[in-house]
Image (cartoon, rainbow, N blue to C red):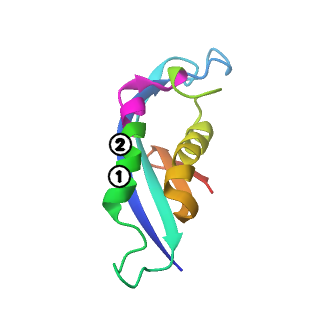
Amino acid sequence: MLTVTKDYRFEAAHSLPHLPEDHKCHRLHGHSYRFTVECTGQVDPDTGFIIEYSEISKHVKPILKRLDHHNLDDVLPGMSTAENLAQWIYNELSQPLGGLLSGIIVYETSTTSVVAR
């Protein structure tokens, strides 16, 4: 089994009003998010691919349109944490990518990430 990955970026705002008022994430703020789509499977002997990168992008494009330069508080069900964002993206891609989707990694900052599998 092999895993291919493709990275995507978007800008978005969110707030976490359930945190104490003096917590910096309580207020509306933004991040330069990045996420990685992982697809795992066998190499197709006819194409030499597990999945074409363009096929992944075809399904990610509508997700990016919903996220980029939006307030995640208005997009995600529940709290707009990185954990919920990773799970939401995974759920959005699980049907179109089928059994090949093996994980989503969301980077809220350059040093913090969440993995949904």
Residue type at numbered disc 2: Lys
Judged from this view, the residue extending furthest toward the top is 21
Q: Could you say where residue 6 lies in the image, as x and y percent from the top left?
A: 38, 59
Q: Are marks 1 and 2 in contact (CB under 8 Å)?
A: yes
Query: Label 2: few (<14), some or many (≥20) within 10 Å?
Result: few
Q: Would you say residue 66 sits in the magenta stretch?
A: yes
Give, as a single range, the part of the protein colored magenta: 64-73
Residue beneath label 1, please? 57
Residue beneath label 2, please? 61
Q: Residue at x 53, y 43 (%)?
A: 92
SS state under label 1: helix
Q: Could you say where residue 98 lies in the image, as x and y percent from the top left?
A: 55, 58
Judged from this view, the residue extending furthest toward the bottom is 45
Q: Could you say where residue 101 lies in the image, as x and y percent from the top left?
A: 54, 60
Give the spatial CA distance, label 1 vs label 2: 6 Å
Residue type at numbered disc 1: Ser
Q: Residue at x 61, y 37 (%)?
A: 84
* In the rendered image, the vertical position of residue 27 relative to residue 112, given as above or below: above
Q: Residue at x 42, y 38 (%)?
A: 63
Provide the major secondary structure of the magenta segment. helix
* In the rendered image, the vertical position of residue 14 relative to residue 43, given as above or below: above
